[in-house]
Image (spheres, grey):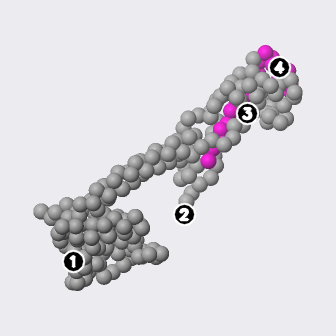
Amino acid sequence: MIFYGTNGKHYATEPLPGTPCPACQAPDGLHVALVSRYAHVYWIPLFPYQKIALTQCAHCQSTWEEKQLAPDLAPAVRSVKTHHHAPAWTWAGLVLVAAFSLYGYLRSIRDTHTDEALLASPRAGDIYTVRADSSRRYSLLKVRQVGGNVVELVANEYETDESTPLNSLNEPARYSKEPFTLTFLDLQIMRRKGQITDVDRLAPAE
Ligand SMILES: [Zn+2]
């Protein structure tokens, strides 16, 4: 369940000097209170979407929303409103989301480069995550030997919905005993067709 919603926060108060209160005529009682309305997810502010300017009289406590203001007051209030931006923290969530996306994007580029490099020079022990055509089932192929431009592989006999099945499937007993061979070119073609979705070279066991 995702908790999200909107919230409002008072973030600035500006006096409106030289304007008498329309209600009590006090000369210097008016000020404008600015409220930022913002969207939040799990109480982390995402982005501001509305500014509210409340005009209040410190003297008689009268309060006016913008649409209730007399025409002679409205421009001064609007000017206060446009000169005070919503506080930066109301953007915190969106900045976080952007930072995470960028991080994920950069990491996926790096992973892809690594995958291509590993696939171009196979080594015994390499594990390929493979996806059957037009299915969302994943399994593994393990390189047993490399010779010339041919790899000898064994197929994992299990499959799973997980796109990263390495942890759940990679046990020696789960691989077929019947090896088969593919050429380096076969591997490249499978990669280009999206049949090999990941390449892992695990650190050798100590
Ligand atoms: Zn007043």
Q: Which residue is mark 4?
A: 20
The residue range painted magenta reads 18-39
Which of discs 4 and 1 lies nearer the camera? The answer is: 1
Give the mark nearest the N terminus, 3 or 2. 2
Q: Which residue is mark 2?
A: 1
The disc labelled 2 sits on which kind of residue?
Met
The disc labelled 4 sits on which kind of residue?
Pro
Q: Quadrant of residue 176?
A: bottom left
Give the mark nearest the N terminus, 3 or 1. 3
- Exactly how many numbered labels are in the figure? 4
Q: What distance separates the C-alpha of mark 2 from that of mark 4?
A: 51 Å
Q: What distance separates the C-alpha of mark 3 from that of mark 4?
A: 18 Å
Question: How many C-alpha atoms fall within 10 Å of the one at disc 3: few (<14), some, or many (≥20)?
Answer: many
Q: Kindly give the residue lying farthest to the left in the view shown.
A: 206
How far from the left and from the top, in percent, is residue 170?
A: 27, 73
Which of discs 3 and 1 lies nearer the camera? The answer is: 1
Q: Which residue is mark 1?
A: 172
Give the mark nearest the N terminus, 3 or 4. 4
Q: What distance separates the C-alpha of mark 3 from that of mark 2?
A: 34 Å
How far from the left and from the top, in percent, is residue 64?
A: 80, 34
Q: Quadrant of residue 155?
A: bottom left
Instruction: Look at the numbered disc 4 and give the secondary structure of its residue.
Output: loop
Q: What distance separates the C-alpha of mark 3 from that of mark 1?
A: 68 Å
Residue closest to the eye, 174 or 69: 174
Label annotation for residue 13: none
In the displayed structure, would residue 9 be above or below residue 116?
above
In the displayed structure, would residue 134 be above or below residue 95?
below
The magenta stretch spans residue 24? yes
Question: How many C-alpha atoms fall within 10 Å of the one at disc 1: few (<14), some, or many (≥20)?
Answer: few
Q: Quadrant of residue 185?
A: bottom left
Q: On the rendered structure, is 135 left or right of 85?
A: left
Q: Which residue is mark 3?
A: 53
